[in-house]
Amino acid sequence: MPEVYYVISDLHIGGDEQLEHVEFLDELLEFLEKLEKTEEDAELIINGDAFGLWEFTDIEGIEKFDSLVESYPALFEQFEKTGENIPITMLPGNHDYELAAYEEYVGRFAAYNVDLVQEESITRPVGDREIWFEHGMQRDPNNEIRDFGNAYDTPLGYHVNHHVTSRAGKLSDRGRYNWLKDIQAVTPIDRIPVWMSSKYFYREMNPLLRYAAIPFLLLFNLSVVLAVFSGLDLAGIWSAPSNAVDTLVGHLGPASSILQLLLAVNVTIVGLLILIAIPLSIFAWDARKTLHRFGVFEVEEATHPDKPYDQAAREVFENNPDTAVFCYGHTHRPDVREVGDGLVVNTGTWLKRLHRRDVLAGVVPPVFQPSFQLSYMRITEEEAGVVVEHDTVEKPDPGAEELTLTEQLLIAGDRPETDVPDRSVVGE
């Protein structure tokens, strides 16, 4: 058996129109070429969602394989070459779940030296221990396949991607910038409404309207405070804060008149919003309470997306003490963490990652900063024990053309880095 395992997942290759473009194709080919030439006794595990079959809407079944080969001939040629040197094993994910439902796919992939395993999970030996591999959709209620292998078992995630994500691929190039296709990179999916409102504000809104709104939005929090001070002054309760603000603004010279006018308009609007918000908040509170009863808001799962995987890993470790590593993908968050006596490993994604950057002042929509982190894991046994190494294939982050000047100014500074240890040893 191999002594070293390279693991990748969540490539999401393919789909309707704009989704067909693979931004990391050159890097993926380079990675596969490296494995083609390696002298290690290795195996490549593609741990689910290699392809975006759910995002095809004009063709069905095995025809999707023919479309993939036609669209990405260099990729399948490289699969064939790499597979001559090391085994390549592929597990179905949710986006390419059809790979588990049609037996014809096994033979088609075998022709390119890829061993498609139509199972939910597999294990591999590493020294005297084992590695557990699964894509992870079975731990996600929105994407769980209850009758695994049944082509007609379509969870909620299927309908979202088949009808929404694929439609986004068809409409993406109609925007001021080709951004809508990135909807597949938004995780968790409950962030999609916020992401779309952000892209509308920074990309699609008329620039004059946006530039007129930004000062009001940035000064919104300050205007709330000034509105309260003005109310206290008008009521004759406390005038000192308003007088202090007037004195402070007066020291700004010629600019004070413009600032006073801007603040006066803001305070007036905020005051009206506060009056309207009081009755609306009562209705919103009652509506949210009702939605909670129906289970619409899954706050805990959104806040702790790794919780079901940690629980699943504990069960695997308890049922089979020889298991040292629980490896999954699906959530697009590369990670290596200790759970019980083993390591839980998330292989991340090769899609563009969108980091939410909240603007500190006012109520300006958050900015979703794009970056690439083409993660792969290397698992082997050394004298110290079972070792998991995290590495990335270098790829420059998307250029400034993906962020407007306004977005760049609002999030000035380095992008957030994912804190994944380069090397972890089981039990260390």
Image (cartoon, rainbow, N blue to C red):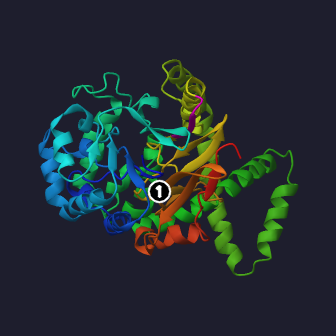
| 418 to 426, vertically: above or below | below
As for residue 251 lying within the magenta part, the answer is no
Measured as percent of width and height from the top left, residue 285 is found at 59, 27
- In the depicted view, which residue is nearer to us: 417 or 96? 96
Segment colored magenta? 321-326
Question: What residue does disc 1 label?
Answer: 376
As drawn, 96 above or below 230? above
Q: Position of residue 118 (x, y in %)?
A: 29, 34
Identify the amino acid type marked 1. Answer: Tyr
Q: Would residue 378 be seen by someone viewing this image from the given angle? A: yes
| Quadrant in the rendering for residue 280 | top right
Q: Residue at x 13, y 39 (%)?
A: 60
Give above or below for 250 relative to 99.
Answer: below
Residue 55, quarter of the rendered image: top left
Horizontally, residue 39 falls left or right of residue 111, namely right
Q: Nearer the viewer, residue 101 or 228?
A: 101
Q: Tell me if I can see residue 421 in this picture.
A: no
Residue 206 at what x, y percent from top left? 38, 64
What residue is drawn where x is 40% and y is 73%?
401
State which quadrant residue 86 falls in. Answer: bottom left
Q: Secondary structure at mark 1?
A: strand
State the predominant SS element of the stretch in magenta: strand
Q: Is residue 341 left or right of residue 399?
A: right
